[in-house]
Image: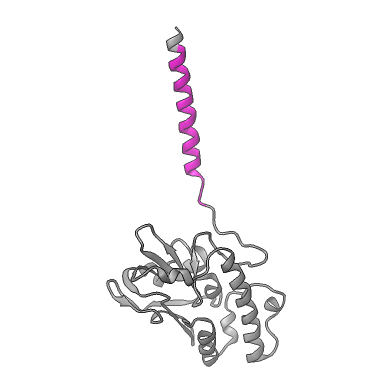
Amino acid sequence: MTVLLFISTIAVFLTIDYFVRRNKSAVPIAQPVLRKDIPMRIPAGIFFTKSHTWLSLFPSGKVQLGIDDFLARMFSKPHITMLKVNDEHVIKGEPILRVTEGSKEVIVRSPIDGVIDNVNGLLEKKPSLLSEALFSEGWAYTITPTSTNDLRAFYLGEDTRMWLRDELGRLRDFFARLSGPAPAFLQDGGLPANGIMDNLNPDQCKKFEHEFLRIE
């Protein structure tokens, strides 16, 4: 009788453990939280670069690369053109993406050397992924880096937030130099509204590209 009671107790605990584990696995992955000081998506463990790209490092040493929330917000309905193909070598500073909307265009450059393993063709077909699923389905390339040493120079965590605060300040100054007072939401410390590039002509877009998307 004691043995049967012991076995029954173990069975009950195993059943409880099973349902607890199943419920935990059903919980959706938390999405990046927009903080009041920097109201942009900045997931933990993601590297950010001065060219406004992000990189997620895999255990294999490969990286997934995309454009960050700062740049994604510049356009309301962007068109994405991939400038690299699978198995192609890419050099740091080389153009890898073209983002256009009407006559407005900017070129995004690679922050690393490496080989293109995979191109996310879905991003070209559905650029709305930049706003809907930037750090999951909204990636652009998977790359095998020549060296991961470059990652040491990129921003991570609190360093990213401090850098983006400076970038928002530079963006306010940029608009002030081009056309007088910056848009109200930038003056108030707000984030760039979707389609802010509509305020610029093609030449000014190139100035934006030179100041904010260059590889140093």
Q: State whether residue 127 appears in this view.
A: no
Q: Is residue 210 above or below residue 120?
A: below
Q: Nearer the viewer, residue 155 or 177?
A: 155
Q: Is residue 81 above or below residue 60?
A: below
Q: State whether residue 87 appears in this view.
A: yes
Image-quadrant location for residue 127: bottom left
Residue 126 part of the magenta-drawn span: no
Mainly helix, strand or loop, the magenta region?
Answer: helix
Boundaries of the magenta span: 5-29
Q: Residue furthest top?
A: 1
Q: Is residue 55 above or below residue 90?
A: above
Image-quadrant location for residue 37: bottom right
Q: Residue furthest left?
A: 87
Q: Residue at x 63, y 67 (%)?
A: 39
Q: Position of residue 9 (x, y in %)?
A: 48, 19
Residue 20 part of the magenta-drawn span: yes
Q: Residue at x 51, y 64 (%)?
A: 132
- Residue 8 shown left or right of residue 113 in the figure: right
Q: Position of residue 98 (x, y in %)?
A: 42, 80
Q: Position of residue 158 (x, y in %)?
A: 59, 64
Q: How is the image coloured?
A: one colour
- Residue 202 shown left or right of residue 92 in the figure: right
- Residue 159 shown left or right of residue 1 in the figure: right
Could you tell me which quadrant the N terminus lies in?
Answer: top left
